[in-house]
C-alpha cells in the first residue's frame, strides 16, 4: 500500500526544510510520498471559507479507495506503536485498511482543517496536545512515521 502525506504550501520557517527533506528521503524507502497542496492566504474570507477552499484542493487529490487520516488537534492522540500497527495493517491488508489502496495523511493550513475533511476522514490523529506551527507539525509527523516504520522493520531506531 502506498502512503501519501499532504502538506499545505511551502514549509515555514525555511530553517525546517532540511529536516523535512531528510525524513522525506528516509521515508521514500518505505514507499511514502510527500506532496504539498496550495494553501490559501488568510484574506477577507471567513476562516471557514478559507479552510473549505483548502479542503476542496485536498479532495481533488484523493482517489477512490483511499484511507484518509486527518491530523488535527482535536483528534485521537496517536502513539508510535499504534502507528506501527496501522502500518503493518497497510502491508497485510488487514482491518482497518482492508480494501484500501492508499493511505493519505493530511495536515491543514494555518487555520487548520475544514470540518468536511475531518468528517470524511477514516481516522483523525492528534500529533500533540499543543497547537504548533505547520512546519513543526510536518517534522513531528514525518519523524513519527519514520519511527513507526523502524518499529515495523525491527530496526533499533525506536528504543522501547
Image: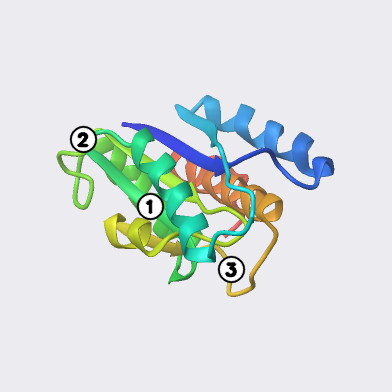
Label placed on residue 7: none
Is the residue marked by circle 2 packed among few (<14), some (14-19), or many (20+) residues within 10 Å? few
Left or right, 141 with respect to 94, comes to right
Label placed on residue 69: 1
Q: Residue furthest left?
A: 99
Dot 3 falls on a residue whose secondary structure is loop
Is the residue marked by circle 3 packed among few (<14), some (14-19), or many (20+) residues within 10 Å? some
Q: Residue 150 at x, y = what percent?
A: 53, 41
Q: Residue furthest front?
A: 44
Residue plotted at (38% across, 34% down): 61
Left or right, 32 with respect to 63, comes to right
Q: Identify the residue position indicated by label 3 in the image.
A: 128
Dot 2 falls on a residue whose secondary structure is loop
Q: Identify the residue position indicated by label 2 in the image.
A: 64
Count of picture labels: 3
Q: Residue 28 at x, y = what percent?
A: 53, 26
Identify which residue, 122 or 36, lies in the foreground.
36
Dot 1 falls on a residue whose secondary structure is strand
Alpha carbon distance from label 2 to label 3: 29 Å
When asked about the image quadrant of residue 24, the answer is top right
Identify which residue, 54 or 1, lies in the foreground.
54
The earlier-in-sequence mark between 1 and 2 is 2
Identify which residue, 41 or 87, lies in the foreground.
41
Residue plotted at (15% across, 39% down): 99
Amino acid at each position: 500500500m502506498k502512503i501519501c502525506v499532504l502538506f499545505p504550501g511551502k514549509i515555514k520557517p525555511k530553517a525546517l526544510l532540511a529536516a523535512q527533506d531528510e525524513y522525506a528521503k528516509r521515508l521514500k524507502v518505505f514507499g511514502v510520498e510527500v506532496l504539498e497542496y496550495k494553501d490559501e492566504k488568510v484574506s477577507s474570507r471567513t476562516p471557514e471559507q478559507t479552510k473549505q477552499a483548502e479542503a476542496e484542493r485536498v479532495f481533488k487529490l484523493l482517489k477512490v479507495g483511499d484511507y484518509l487520516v486527518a491530523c488535527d488537534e482535536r483528534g485521537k492522540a496517536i502513539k508510535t506503536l499504534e502507528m506501527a500497527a496501522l502500518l503493518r495493517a497497510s502491508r497485510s491488508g488487514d482491518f482497518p485498511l482492508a480494501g484500501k489502496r492508499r493511505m493519505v495523511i493530511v495536515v491543514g493550513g494555518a487555520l487548520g482543517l475544514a470540518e468536511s475533511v475531518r468528517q470524511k476522514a477514516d481516522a483523525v490523529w492528534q500529533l500533540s496536545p499543543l497547537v504548533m506551527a505547520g512546519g513543526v507539525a510536518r517534522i513531528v509527523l514525518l519523524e513519527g512515521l519514520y519511527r513507526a516504520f523502524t518499529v515495523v522493520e525491527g530496526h533499533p531506531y525506536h528504543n522501547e
